[in-house]
Amino acid sequence: MISIRQLQKSFQAQQGQVNALKGIDLEVSEGEFCVLLGPSGCGKTTTLRCVAGLERPDGGEIEISGRLVNSPRSRTFVPAEKRQIGMVFQSYAIWPHMNVFQNVAFPLTQGQKRVSKSSVAERVRAALKRVQLDGLEDRPATDLSGGQQQRVAMARAIVTDSRVLLMDEPLSNLDARLREQMRVELRKITKSIGVTTLYVTHDQAEALSLGDKVCVMNHGEILQIARPNEVYARPVNLFVAQFVGEMNFVKAEVIDSGEVGCSLGKLPISIPNGVSKGANITLAIRPEHVKVLPMTSDSANHVRGKITSKNYLGDSALLEVEVNGTRHGVIHG
Ligand SMILES: Nc1ncnc2c1ncn2[C@@H]1O[C@H](COP(=O)(O)OP(=O)(O)OP(=O)(O)O)[C@@H](O)[C@H]1O
Ligand SMILES: [Mg+2]
């Protein structure tokens, strides 16, 4: 549905050239919810803007629904308004001087598009129903809560029946509780329409809960593309491991195929193929994969430590455990 091949984009900034995208490849299939996740400045917005046609890439190709919309090599550039894409951004960007109906109708009534009045009304109502704002047509846009304003922006993005929806941190202006509610809603709405979605966030929890697929980016490159559970359980490198979820890192040396030595002592661990004896490695241990047992128990693979702090999380607690002078996070309960 969306096919990005070797996409490159650089900017001239005061301090010199910034290579915002260094040749990224990404396929998003029909109806899929794909999340771009990465730290500030890694190139998420630039990717989205290139797909939207708001930015002209320096190299590579973009295809939407099998149609080439971008290829500097063949001088193809389909302008934004001809790409049939819905967009939602961080700032709600809804018009304060219009009511809800007028805001949502905007893409249907501006420009050269000729949509009949009754058809506009019908489509606006259908879009508002999708985002559960039916009945609020006449409300001034400024008299809405943050969550409602973001829904108006959603309705406006889907009113044109776009097959592709681009969203750039749409929930980051909302408070924590509303953000979590809207996450669930957002996924429901996009799935019920069956729209193909490319969604940008730097919040790993949001990425894991929303995405059918998560692309972890850093410095203009995609490091890993996988399902959320796979990114979490099998990060491809240390960057992904530390960026997605909590992780303890412990430097270690391979003693033999089934054992490593580290500050936690000698630990029996299955070593991946290709890692030889004597190699220096880093163990990455999720806090919830460590079990806390009384001193008296004598299970295999155990390490003695001292609990130095305890944070209740409700159904569990995050402990800080000191072992041989180093502190590690452990989820208990
Ligand atoms: N118009 C521009 N002029 C110069 N540099 C730019 C421009 N737009 C983006 N950049 C640079 O390109 C890089 C990628 O920017 P981008 O906005 O894509 O990052 P991002 O991943 O969306 O970050 P954030 O999470 O902060 O929104 C950054 O180093 C940024 O400073
Ligand atoms: Mg951005």
Image: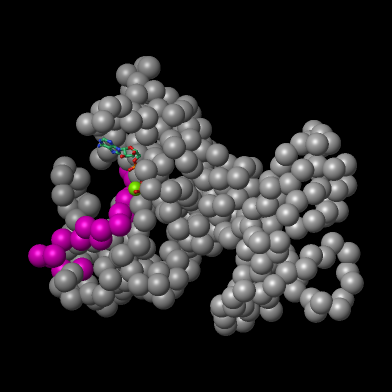
User: Quadrant location of residue 118?
Assistant: bottom left
Ligand 1 sits in which quadrant? top left
Q: Residue at x 27, y 38 (%)?
A: 54
Outermost residue toward the front in this view: 325
Image quarter for residue 159? bottom left
**Residue sitting at x 22%, y 31%:** 14
The picture places residue 199, in percent across and down from the top left corner, at 43, 51
Tell which of 122 and 31 is nearer to you: 31
Q: Quadrant of the C terminus?
A: bottom right
Q: Position of residue 316 (x, y in %)?
A: 63, 79
From the image, give the main secondary structure of the stretch colored magenta: loop
Residue 243 falls within the magenta-colored stretch: no
Q: In the shown orientation, is residue 138 left or right of residue 279? A: left
Of residues 157 and 36, the one nearer the viewer is 36
| Residue 266 seen in this snapshot | yes
Color style of the picture = one colour
Horizontal side of 285 relative to 85 (left or right) equals: right
Task: Tell me the residue at 35%/21% (across/down).
Answer: 72
Work out whether 319 lies above or below 273: below
Q: How many marks?
A: 0
Q: Where is residue 28 drawn, in percent x and y? A: 51, 42
Asked whether 108 or 153 is in front, the reply is 153
The answer, for residue 77, to whether it is visible in the render is no
Tell which residue pokes out farthest to the left in this image: 97
* 21 versus 284 height, above or below: above
Which range of residues does the magenta coloring cover?
84-100
* Left or right: 26, with 282 as reference point: left
Q: Is residue 262 above or below residue 6?
A: below
Q: Is residue 330 above or below residue 2?
A: below
Please name the residue shown 53% across and 52% down the image. Answer: 243
Residue 210 location (% of width, % of height): 51, 60
Q: Quadrant of residue 319?
A: bottom right
